[in-house]
């Protein structure tokens, strides 16, 4: 059983068995038929993954690491807020007629800020500090920009990363205000673990611990039967994930920089309703 399986199963069981129902008609998300999308939730879930031991890829169902990496590079490398720069349809529901999701995600990553060493956007500042100030306790990003929230199609869910170098290993904390466990948990864990691997490699570091902090971890009402079936499935050891060692510049990575070997997993759960 992979570390991703263990965390996913434990979190989902806890939500189903001990979580609190949110059945208030004022909830923001709705289903396609117009009905409010209620959830069962747990407040403040913390899961830890040791990337020096294995890559946290779910085996209960297939997760496309290349597609997950494509989205994280869309935000962190391309610094884009336009779905035409993304090779999947996951953001289509929030895009306008021009493909923009407003001043969200990649847009915030592209904004430059003043430092004593000059101007950097958040990504380039992290890369600069990892190489030049690895002892710093200030290596972090935050895209929850209150001044721009009114111009975002969706407020950032995964909004902050804190990086810390410990014993020559790059460790990181992802802070997430909200997590749809079925639709996004395994995806987010894989893509941010991949981000840590990429940042570590180009900074001359090993990958260390990845910590995922979720303020509101929830399962939508119509997803509960699917999750209950999923967590009863057989699980398998984590696959081997290899990052192309020849890449030395973060801006040279592509989804093809990752190779997944010996990935044994359960069958796909197919399409399921998504609350918007």
Image (cartoon, rainbow, N blue to C red):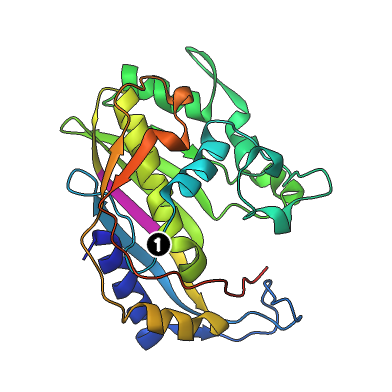
Density class for disc 1 (Cα within 10 Å; few <14, some 14-19, many ≥20) is some
Q: Residue at x 67, y 55 (%)?
A: 154
Position of residue 137 measured from the top left corner of the image (x, y, whole percent):
32, 33
**Quick check: is 211 in the magenta stretch?**
yes
- Front residue of this view, candidates 60 and 203: 60
Residue that badge 1 annotates: 62
- Specify the farthest residue to the right: 97
Residue interval drawn in magenta? 209-214
Q: Position of residue 178 (x, y in %)?
A: 52, 63
State the residue at coordinates (42%, 58%).
63
| 7 within the magenta span | no
Give the camera-side residue of 276 and 85. 85
Res 272 quadrant in image = bottom right
Query: Seen from this angle, which residue lies furthest top?
Result: 117
Instruction: Please tell me whether mark 1 sits on a helix, a strand or a loop.
Output: loop
Q: Main secondary structure of the magenta part?
A: strand
**94 left or right of 230 in image:** right
Q: Quadrant of residue 92?
A: bottom right
Quarter of the image for the C terminus: give it: bottom right
């Amino acid at each position: 059983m992979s570390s991703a399986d263990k965390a996913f199963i434990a979190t989902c069981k806890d939500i189903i068995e001990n979580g609190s129902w949110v059945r208030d008609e004022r909830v923001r998300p709705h289903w396609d038929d117009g009905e409010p999308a209620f959830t069962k939730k747990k407040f403040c879930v913390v899961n830890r993954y040791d990337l020096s031991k294995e890559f946290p890829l779910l085996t209960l169902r297939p997760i496309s690491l290349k597609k997950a990496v494509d989205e994280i590079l869309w935000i962190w490398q391309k610094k884009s807020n336009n779905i035409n720069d993304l090779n999947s349809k996951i953001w289509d529901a929030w895009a306008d007629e021009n493909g923009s999701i407003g001043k969200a995600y990649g847009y915030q990553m592209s904004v430059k800020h003043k430092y004593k060493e000059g101007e950097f956007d958040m990504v380039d500042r992290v890369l600069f500090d990892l190489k030049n100030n690895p002892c710093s306790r200030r290596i972090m990003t935050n895209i929850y920009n209150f001044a721009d929230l009114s111009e975002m199609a969706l407020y950032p869910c995964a909004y902050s990363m804190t990086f810390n170098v410990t014993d020559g290993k790059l460790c990181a904390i992802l802070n997430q205000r909200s997590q749809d466990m079925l639709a996004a948990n395994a995806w987010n864990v894989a893509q941010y673990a991949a981000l840590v691997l990429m940042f570590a490699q180009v900074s001359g570091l090993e990958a260390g611990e990845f910590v995922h902090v979720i303020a509101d971890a929830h399962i939508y009402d119509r997803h509960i039967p699917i999750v209950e079936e999923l967590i009863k499935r057989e699980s398998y050891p984590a696959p081997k994930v290899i990052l192309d060692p020849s890449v030395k510049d973060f801006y040279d990575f592509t989804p093809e920089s990752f190779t997944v070997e010996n990935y044994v997993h359960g069958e796909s759960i197919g399409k399921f309703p998504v609350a918007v």
